[in-house]
Image: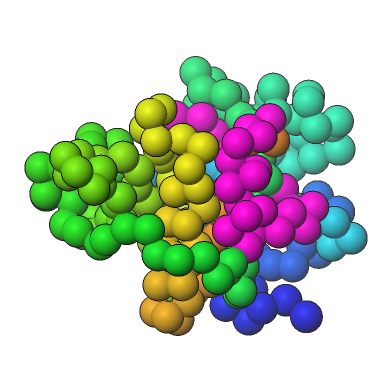
């Protein structure tokens, strides 16, 4: 049975779940309103094996997007940007994961305000707090996690590690630590990554986010 928090997250985020056909295209006001980062996200989708896929767009864009629903994935992705009014962007297919049972790894970081000078630029958009790991000797930033607070039911984890700190297991420990916090706050943690990103896939596996064969459709920034 699908976790009810995930169900409510998908309904709120996409506009419908489960899909009522193999490739369902739905209109949602969420595609016209600022998202977790204050930006408008005009298109996204989630697919589940054996259930189908929901593609979400602003209501006026639904007919154009619906006309692409029967295309092979590669052709669909190529035509999505123009169909949703962003012809200068690229659509992509990623892996959608979630967990209700993060790996029991030891904590690796501390939660601090995004205004702290040690927080790198890419993490500052994840207000009000981020999870970071510092070098134990210099105190310099080495790795961090931000949370995309999509809604009260589902929050997405983003992680980054400095090159010199990779291969030490920091990312998976930080992701598991962040997942536990999200669950404690009453939401389900999600983790999205590109299908070709082997490193991110390994982090997800190790942190307790299994690959259930679910997919994510989005637009590159």
Is residue 183 among what the camera can see? yes
Q: In this view, does 208 lie to the left or right of 20?
A: left
Q: Position of residue 5 (x, y in %)?
A: 57, 77
Location of the C terminus (image quadrant)? top left
Q: Is residue 152 left or right of residue 69?
A: left
Judge by depth and name the residue closer to the eye, 5 or 22. Answer: 5
Q: Is residue 95 left or right of residue 117?
A: right
Judge by depth and name the residue closer to the eye, 8 or 106. Answer: 106
Residue at x 61% of width, y 74% of height: 101
Residue at x 60% of width, y 74% of height: 100
Q: Where is residue 172 in the image (x, y as percent from the top left)?
A: 52, 52
Q: Is residue 116 magenta?
A: no
What residue range appears in magenta?
196-221
Q: Position of residue 177 (x, y in %)?
A: 43, 65
Is residue 154 among what the camera can see? no
Location of the N terminus (image quadrant)? bottom right
Residue at x 77% of width, y 36% of height: 67
Position of 176 relative to 216 (above/below): below
Q: Does the magenta stretch include residue 204?
A: yes
Residue at x 64% of width, y 44% of height: 202
Residue found at the very far right of the displayed protein: 50
């Amino acid at each position: 049975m699908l976790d009810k928090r995930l169900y409510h997250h998908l309904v709120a985020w996409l506009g419908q779940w489960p899909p009522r056909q193999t490739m369902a295209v739905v209109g949602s006001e969420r595609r016209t309103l600022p998202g977790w980062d204050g930006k408008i996200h005009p298109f996204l989708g989630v697919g589940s094996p054996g259930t189908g896929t929901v593609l979400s767009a602003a209501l006026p864009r639904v007919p154009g997007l619906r006309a692409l629903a029967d295309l092979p994935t590669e052709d669909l992705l190529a035509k999505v940007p123009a169909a949703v009014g962003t012809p200068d962007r690229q659509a992509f297919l990623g892996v959608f994961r979630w967990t209700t049972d993060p790996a029991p790894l030891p904590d690796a970081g501390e939660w601090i305000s995004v205004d702290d000078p040690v927080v790198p630029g890419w993490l500052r958009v994840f207000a009000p707090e981020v999870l970071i790991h510092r070098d134990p000797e210099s105190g310099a930033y080495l790795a961090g996690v931000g949370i995309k607070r999509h809604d009260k039911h589902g929050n997405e984890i983003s992680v980054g590690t400095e090159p010199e700190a990779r291969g030490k297991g920091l990312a998976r420990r930080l992701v598991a630590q962040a997942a536990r916090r999200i669950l404690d706050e009453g939401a389900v943690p999600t983790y999205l990554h590109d299908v070709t990103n082997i490193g991110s896939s390994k982090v997800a596996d190790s942190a307790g986010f299994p690959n259930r064969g679910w997919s994510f459709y989005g637009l590159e920034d």
